[in-house]
């Protein structure tokens, strides 16, 4: 079907590549199908409040390819408010003459997309997560950029750690999964990597550092995912309260691990928490290509009526998979991958 | 089998990530299997001349992770000399007590590896090509770095092209396949991409640039793979002679296309040939992870006796495939991928 | 004087930091003096053809800080046409109610600015040159970015040169002066640097490379400024014609030096010509700060009536110097600086 | 005097460029004067404990040009222990046959150098500080790298702040002076910059952010030096204890300012503390050139007998100034420079 009216929105945390997806949708819709695209601002909130902007296929849409963040803004909406808003959403989409909706977001957003789809709205999803934790797709855009930023930081920390004979802890993003820690740690030549999927034993980490010093090495780099958890009974963590969904947060897990190593080994230990720089800025070439392809394929899927699906990367190919396959569980680091990383510790 | 003696070598053009593979092999062999690793210098030449160095699992092997090129040196050996050297190779490997050989190289190297394997030498290959043209694997290390360097360059050329109202041609690597041009062109927001797999029509390129100017745009960026070829009868190219294997080379295809556009449109056109910077320097985080995994898995395959195979990336997994599946034909850009890129031209 | 109407334009080759200057002018004029700023397009041409745009002190002016090139466009105007255009220029400025003009450009542009000033137009200049060849100022913006891009490239070439046992020639910008070659060569650890100020002896360069090989080194990096010239009688160069001002050009001096070294030493030699990537893209932090300060001070100078001057960097300070001090001769690399660089060759 | 025996050491916090200085000293001493160089490990401590390594003018010294940190290691020595060690130092230098000592370090190290010089030891200093706070020199190496890293981070934070309508605080290094905050803030287009030299008024910062929101802007970036101090009576800070010299430290000043803005404006505010990544890693081209020149000139000064001096950058030139001129007070950001930065806030 040509000459459609497509709507898109970006929801959840921002992520390098969101604008490349938007550009891919607008370009494909316009040049290949003669369709038009409208964007809702600030995620689901903008859809519910009917705040929309027309997106034109002109030079300005080209410029956003390199730009981090999202020109549409993003936001989080409490699931309850979302679920009570079905009639409003339907009315707003009808009012705007929207034939298909492309929500771009993480597992929570895709869950919402599935629910809308189940309720009769023609939806094609685009998975977005710097954490790489969405099921059903090999990789998501934003992840490569986050890993690159973290790796650059680790590269820099090697020399300062070595010059001062220090153990250096780097806390990276990853509340539920350890993909960023795993990849940045491997790319950065870390001497230990701590991820949520593999509860850590502080004694084992200390032993690994000690072994280094005994072998004459002068420093150590430890990469810690923010969602790292100790093996039960091995280390007490100070709680940082609970998040909006009731899960306990351990603020500054990197700092806490660092303090403990310092206490146990009596060695100079410093912690760096990379924070928001991992999710901002110009996407890497890899993420620009992946995000652009997602956008092109999502637009195509709308015109081919493949609703209730999401784009996904499988090997070299972009495919459409049922939204149901992308939600429900998070994609965790498998034990084999962690074992490969461990082979390089030391 | 533990306690093996493994040999490795790097052959063909250098490629960011070679050292990460070597490190992965040495670390895994040493820490997981108690094996030792020896490296032959300058590719097959070093193997035939028995020039080898012991590679130790110490801090120095860690440092090479970030370093471009190859600490073993590389080289090219004429296939005839190679084929006549079987007895020498066997004698040298026996003399050094080598139980398994891991050659790291492109399609030609893997062909050699297969031939050695067919002749009874226990071989596990590692594919290497910045061009991404080896069959049977989704991606090869070095490619992401090359694309990143080319994309950085294209990013820079946008603003200078725009300030001067110019058409800017960027010639990138890719003698036989257009992967680097395709990805860097997509990532860099190029307005036209020319690849060997899709013979170009200079009139069509000129028309695309003219359309831009008519729409009020002030400049254009065209990415050209060095192996680009015109549709028969559409443009005559000055030949640059023949390469060592007898294939005609068109030196400076980018410049020739630029000259032709200038002649036809009367517009200011400039050409930049990126050259060797695409293959040197620190690998990207993506390439370091991929190369490290290749090294780890190649070492494991040796210890598990999976000879006659090469490591390969399939989706998220590293698998062993028969060497025969990786040689014979080059992996070209499929038409669908070029069509996706075309949707973004203009 | 407050509430002025200031005009600006960018002339000559584009240069990273031009937009930062424009932003600095607009911001300062608006917030500190309640003045407005208008921009002429495409350099002197736009001034003569009265093509102007209003520049507003809003968010859009902030965004240009990071952007290479110039939002005003740039161009070159033949001096004769410029000199015959005085009355047109005066009429256009009067028509637009312009109280002061800030031309941003290189030595040629500042010469034009001086001539306008001598003819009664209130002018404050801003020196611009990636070549760093404007007299009277320690450094100019754009130079640091060009050096950084060239240094990144040289860093990458080291590993590929080493892996292949090659001599690698890198031709960088600098038609009349060797500043970029000098700094990038020093920063990149080049083994020889050739600049226009010091005519080269090809035999000496070959000897330096030979000495490296004799000492067991495997490769060499030579940085060549595009305006490099041989000592009389030591090497014949193929001419590339004459430029618009009648000066002979030797196209591809890097390639020619490379060919000669290859012929004399019989060694594998490769040449990379960096070209336009040196002048495009996001400016370095250094250039953004310098360009911003230039813009702020130029705006101030207009409001303080310091006409007939140009901003200049002296140590840590931005000062106003007579336009006459910035034109007439180019700032060359002094012998002492080249001698310091030579101490690191080898 | 030729054929000297020179000693060098690096003291205080590590800094990108230290290795480039060492390389400059070794190369110049060796090739221009036939002298040899020895390095003491871990700063003054290594000198007192007579831990030294010979530094050879070979390929390995070339490789360190790009490497952050210091191959000699660094450390801090309590002034008392240092002052009591004069005889030990003299004995160790005599024992090693050292003719001249080149300590590379910050204000404290240069103070020590001056004291040694006053006590008859032939000393030439090299100023080192990423903070740019050493008197008598325009800039010091390491500063440009720190500013570049911080600017990259700020660039990334813009898009994430904008996508989420946030105020983003970036805490950068600078315990006593605000140079890094000033330059990175200007280069990164920050909307407010807080430096130690200009005590801040939290109400004024809040007002500046509010004005942005009233004008329709969606976010704000505030750069805070770690040594920022409130105007007396305007905001209470939680103390982080005292440092080794008895000065009070306010740990997490960025976080504290962020919390206060959040409390006052009710706006989403996030804080990123860049930490150690500012001082590690490959130096920028600017820093490599400056550090190399420092090394070359320090070696020359030794051979010319200019003891009791330190190298310093004045405009384009490296000069020798009395050690006394470099110590005693720190180089602060002058009010004029802060005023220029303020012109760009908003």
Image: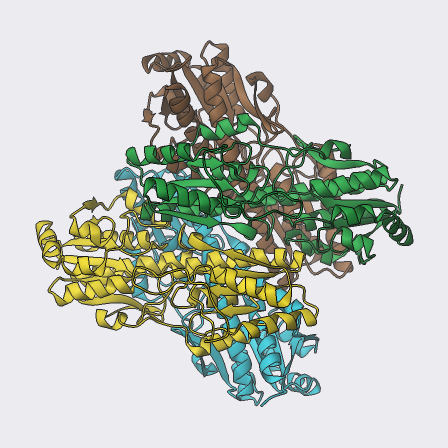
Chain colours: A brown, B green, C yellow, D cyan
Judged left or right of residue A102, residue B246 is right
Q: Nearer the viewer, residue D107 or C192?
A: C192
Judged left or right of residue D173, residue B37 is right
Q: Nearer the viewer, residue A179 or C311?
A: C311
| Residue at the spot 83% in from the left edge and 56% down from the top edge | B50
- Tally of numbered tags: 0
Image location (x, y in percent) of residue B262: 36, 44
Judged left or right of residue C269, residue A85 is left
Q: Is residue A316 above or below residue D214?
A: above
Q: Is residue B307 above or below residue C215?
A: above
Image location (x, y in percent) of residue A148: 56, 44
| Residue at the spot 45% in from the left edge and 13% down from the top edge | A122
Image location (x, y in percent) of residue C276: 42, 52
Please say whether residue A165 is visible from this viewpoint: yes
Q: Quadrant of the N terminus of chain B?
A: top right
| Residue at the spot 52% in from the left edge and 42% down from the top edge | A278
Judged left or right of residue A334, residue D188 is left
Image location (x, y in percent) of residue C253: 47, 63
Q: Quadrant of the C terminus of chain B?
A: top left
Find residue A235 and report its image quarter. Answer: top right
Q: Nearer the viewer, residue B139 or D147?
A: B139
Q: Residue furthest top?
A: A120
Please say whether residue D263 is visible from this viewpoint: no
């Amino acid at each position: 079907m040509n000459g459609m009216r497509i709507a898109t929105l970006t929801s959840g945390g921002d992520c390098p590549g969101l604008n490349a997806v938007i550009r891919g949708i607008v370009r494909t819709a316009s040049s290949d199908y003669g369709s038009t695209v409208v964007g809702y601002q600030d995620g689901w909130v903008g859809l519910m409040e009917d705040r929309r902007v027309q997106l034109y296929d002109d030079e300005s849409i080209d410029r956003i390819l390199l730009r981090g963040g999202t020109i549409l803004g993003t936001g989080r909406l409490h699931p309850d408010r979302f679920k009570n808003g079905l009639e409003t959403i339907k009315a707003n989409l009808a009012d705007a003459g929207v034939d298909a909706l492309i929500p771009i977001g993480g597992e929570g957003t895709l869950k919402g997309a599935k629910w809308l789809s189940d309720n009769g709205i023609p939806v094609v999803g685009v998975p977005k997560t710097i954490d790489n934790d969405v099921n059903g797709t090999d990789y998501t855009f934003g992840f490569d950029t986050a890993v690159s930023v973290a790796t650059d930081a680790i590269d820099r920390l090697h020399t300062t750690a070595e010059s001062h004979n220090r153990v250096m802890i780097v806390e990276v993003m990853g509340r539920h999964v350890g993909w960023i820690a795993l990849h940045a740690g491997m790319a950065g030549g870390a001497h230990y990597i701590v991820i949520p999927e593999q509860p850590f034993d502080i004694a084992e980490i200390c032993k690994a550092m000690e072994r280094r010093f005994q072998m004459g090495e002068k420093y150590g780099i430890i990469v810690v995912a923010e969602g790292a958890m100790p093996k039960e009974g091995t280390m007490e963590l100070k709680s940082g309260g609970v998040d909006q969904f009731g899960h306990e947060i351990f603020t500054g897990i990197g700092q806490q691990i660092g303090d403990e190593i310092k206490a146990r080994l009596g060695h100079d230990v410093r912690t760096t928490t990379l924070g928001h720089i991992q999710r901002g800025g110009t996407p890497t070439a890899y993420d620009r290509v992946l995000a652009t392809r997602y956008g092109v394929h999502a637009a195509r899927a709308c015109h081919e009526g493949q609703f209730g699906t999401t784009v996904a990367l499988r090997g070299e190919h972009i495919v459409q998979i049922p939204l149901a396959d992308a939600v429900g569980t998070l994609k965790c680091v498998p034990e084999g991958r962690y074992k490969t990383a461990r082979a390089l510790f030391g």
